[in-house]
Image (tube, rainbow, N blue to C red):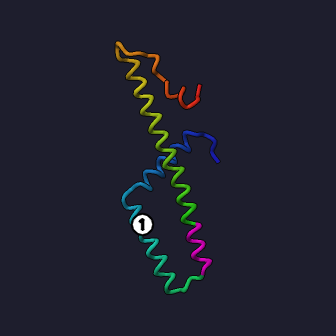
Amino acid sequence: MNKNPKVVIKYLNHLYKTISHPYSFLYALLILLFWFIAGSFMHYDEHWHDAFILFEAIITLLMVFIIESTQQADNRAIQEKLDEIIEKLPQTDNRKIGIEKKYKGER
């Protein structure tokens, strides 16, 4: 696995853009519909149903991590931009720059 965090973040952002596309919902709906139709014709047993639920849970968990990662990256970028604006404006209190780190416990 690549240990460069920038590559991982770039990959997660690309994955997030792909997954958040409107057609992704349509694809997921079609897969679900296919699963139910195929199950009714092939008489899937309980194991197939359990496998589908497990697959669904894994995908849901991964999506939570992907969404959280991209939101944190966006929030960091916005915070850096705001800090730069505060720094450049005259008559601003520069002591407030980076104050969010104090509340998060970072130093």
Quadrant (top left, top right, bottom left, bottom right) of the C terminus: top right
Question: Which residue is rendered at x = 48% and y = 44% of the image?
Answer: 70
Tell me where residue 3 sits by quadrant: top right
**Spot occupied by residue 60 in the image (x, y as percentages of width and height):** 53, 59
Residue holding disc 1: 27
Would you place residue 34 above or below residue 72 in this image?
below
Give neighbour class at mark 1: few <14, some 14-19, many 20+ (Cα, 10 Å): few
Tell me where residue 56 sits by quadrant: bottom right
Q: Is residue 104 left or right of residue 26?
A: right
* In-front residue for pair 105/76: 105
Q: Which amino acid does label 1 sit on?
A: Tyr
Query: Which residue is outermost to the top?
Result: 91
Q: What stretch is highlighted in magenta?
A: 46-54
Q: Does the magenta stretch include residue 28?
A: no
Would you place residue 50 above or below residue 91 in this image?
below
**Spot occupied by residue 73 in the image (x, y as percentages of width and height):** 48, 39
Would you place residue 42 above or below residue 68 in this image?
below
Question: Which residue is rendered at x = 60% and y = 73% of the image?
Answer: 50
**Spot occupied by residue 39 in the image (x, y as percentages of width and height):** 51, 81
Q: Is residue 30 left or right of residue 6?
A: left
**Spot occupied by residue 40 in the image (x, y as percentages of width and height):** 49, 84
Our reading of the magenta stretch's main secondary structure is helix
Q: Is residue 51 magenta?
A: yes
